Structure formats: structure tokens, C-alpha cells
Image (cartoon, rainbow, N blue to C red):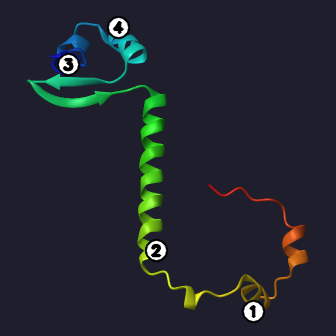
Amino acid sequence: MNNVLSVLNSTVSISQFNRGLAGKIFADVKKSGTKVVMKNNEPEAVIMSPDEYRYLMERMENDDLIAAAAERLKNYDPEKLIPGEQVMAENGITREMLDAMEDVEIE
């Protein structure tokens, strides 16, 4: 029964926006989370806080990175690895050159 109540409490009719209740709806979103906007008894949009949106976007990005890493690992063959020293030598890079470079942050 709690699930039904939470779903009902998280929905808001689009007509409430037309009645000037947008401020109250946004305050509810900030206080208690996501709202599903209904139009003609169908879900039309979802409203969520910017923090929650950022969190979801970061999770999706991380999931994409994990999937890409898993896909690459399918083709992993330790016999085909090239030592870093060999790559540096082939490209004229020395350890001193790398040490002299500014630090770069990679996400």
C-alpha cells in the first residue's frame, strides 16, 4: 500500500501548473524529490532537483565507462601488450620529458 501512496504523492497534474501552483510544486520537489507530471492521465514529464539530475547523469556516465571497459577486456590479450618504455622509445619520449610536464587530471 505504501508504494501506491508514494506513487500518488509523486504525481502532479499539469493543470496545477495552470492554476499557479508551480512554486508549491517546485518546493515539494526540492523537499521530497521527483514529481511525475501527468497530462490526460498519462505521464508527460518528470521534475527533479538539479542535484538529483546531476547524480543520475554521473551514474549513467559511469555505467557507460564500465560497459566500455568490459567490452575492451573481452579483447584483452596479455601477449599483445607493449611495454611503456618501448612506446616511449618509439615516439622519442624520455622519462625526464614526462617528469617535466604539468600534471593533468583525467576523469
Which residue: 86% across, 82% down? 94
Query: Which one is nearer the viewer's eye here, 92 or 2?
Result: 2
Which residue matches tag 3? 14
C-beta proximity under 8 Å, tags 3 and 1: no
C-beta proximity under 8 Å, tags 3 and 2: no
Q: Secondary structure at mark 3?
A: helix
Mark-to-mark CA distance, 1 and 2:
24 Å
Q: Give how far across and how far down residue 17 sits, in percent.
A: 25, 14
40 relative to 79 in the view: left or right: left
Mark-to-mark CA distance, 1 and 4:
64 Å
Which residue matches tag 1? 90
Q: Earlier in the sequence, mark 1 or mark 4?
A: 4
Q: Tag 3: residue type?
A: Ile
Q: Give how far across and how far down residue 103 sits, in percent.
A: 80, 59
Which residue: 81% across, 88% down? 92
Mark-to-mark CA distance, 3 and 1:
63 Å
Which residue matches tag 4? 24
86 relative to 16 in the view: left or right: right
